[in-house]
Amino acid sequence: MNDTLTLIVYILLGVLVLGGVLFVLLRGPKAPPGGYETTRDADDAPAQGEPVTTIEKPASAQGRLVRLRARLSRSNNLLGKGLLALLSSDKIDQDVWDEVEETLLLADLGSGPSQRLVEALQSRVRVEGTENPAAVKAMLREELLRIVGEDTDRSLNLDGEGNNPGVVLVVGVNGVGKTTTVGKLARVMVAEDKNLLLGAADTFRAAAADQLQTWGDRVGVDTVRSDKDGADPASVAFEAVKVGKERGVDTVMIDTAGRLQNKAGLMDQLGKIKRVVEKEAPVTEVLLVIDATTGQNGMIQAKVFSEVVQITGIVLTKLDGSAKGGIVVAIQEELGVPVKLIGLGEGPDDLAPFEPAAFVDALLD
Ligand SMILES: Nc1nc2c(ncn2[C@@H]2O[C@H](COP(=O)(O)OP(=O)(O)OP(=O)(O)O)[C@@H](O)[C@H]2O)c(=O)[nH]1
């Protein structure tokens, strides 16, 4: 009897152990070899544009423009109003011109552009006179537009050539709004029926990849990230471009870390990311994100980045806050790169292409 019981116990134990082994074998390894995770497998991923309940749709372009005007004029129209008042004075003497220049400097326009604008206005006032306020406004609008760069090419290079996806690197110091910008831009691109993939190359901060992935999930875009904290950012970026290429996406957008102690560290990391990624596909756009509220200080930091990688466009964030509009001109002048996008808030629709005419109108309205 005892022997039979022992036999039954052994059989049961055997079944349990065998079941456990089978379960582990069938489930497979937790993470793919190589230590990278993509938030959804290619086969499971809904085609982009396919409705997924949690995916949000962006506001219309028209809606974004209305918002731009409202937000910009809140913080910036003092510049325009101040200039108009000065230029409409009965007598425009040297004191008035000095005040005009001071107003421009206070609006963060930078000394070179301020001086050029004053010179241009001086000569036009001499020729055209200033009695008519509407004429003054038109003159000021024209000169501001000229200085902002009305005809500058501000298009984003988001598409690759042949089998290569477009590769966008998003760089800048910490806290300027890089991840938020990637999320907002991804949303706009999805709405335009683009296929894209995000790469979480900010491996310094554990929460950074989560934050990017949350943005990705919101718009139905996958994120390639490492399953290890502190992984090599260049290899995550490389993996993202490789997966993007395999999937045939239009664009791979890579979020990078901003918390770097010194220029040498920054150079090492960003230089390596670019070099390594370009083994798979050329980088088509390097967007430098700058917080508009940091004024001159932000500009000095931005300059370091521009010395390390070739920046192709600037995203000026937080223009909805206390930022002065003139910073757009100063940054372009200093870095020789156009502002392509502006951030106007923390919400998913608070990103707009930089349009000089709309911008200058918002300053003067
Ligand atoms: N008001 C305002 N806030 C913004 C804007 N863009 C981003 N932010 C906020 O700025 C903060 C930092 O944004 P992140 O996107 O995390 O910045 P980051 O550059 O990725 O930061 P790190 O990952 O630390 O390098 C967040 O609270 C954002 O919501 C903007 O255009 N306007």
Image (spheres, grey):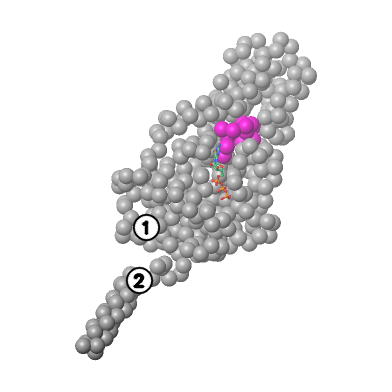
User: Which residue lies under the disc numbered 2?
Assistant: 28
Snapshot quadrant of residue 42: bottom left
Numbered disc 1: secondary structure: loop
The magenta span reads 317-328
User: Which residue lies under the disc numbered 1?
Assistant: 40
Q: Nearer the viewer, residue 265 or 153?
A: 265
Residue behind label 2 places its C-beta within 8 angstroms of ligand 1: no
Name the quadrant where ligand 1 sits: top right
Judge whether 215 appears above or below 272 on screen.
above
Numbered disc 2: secondary structure: loop
Snapshot quadrant of residue 40: bottom left
Residue 146 on the magenta segment: no
Sequence-earlier tag: 1 or 2: 2
Quick one: quadrant of the N terminus? bottom left
**Dot 2 amino acid type:** Gly
Identify the residue at image location x=58%, y=58%. 204
Q: State whether the magenta stretch is mostly helix, strand or loop.
A: loop
Q: Residue furthest front?
A: 1
Identify the residue at image location x=26%, y=86%. 6
Q: Nearer the viewer, residue 240 or 34?
A: 34
Residue 321 on the magenta segment: yes
Q: CA distance from mark 1 to mark 2?
A: 16 Å
Disc number at residue 134? Answer: none
Residue 50: x percent and y percent?
30, 47
Q: Residue furthest bottom?
A: 3
Judge whether 133 appears above or below 219 on screen.
above
For the image, the number of numbered tags is 2
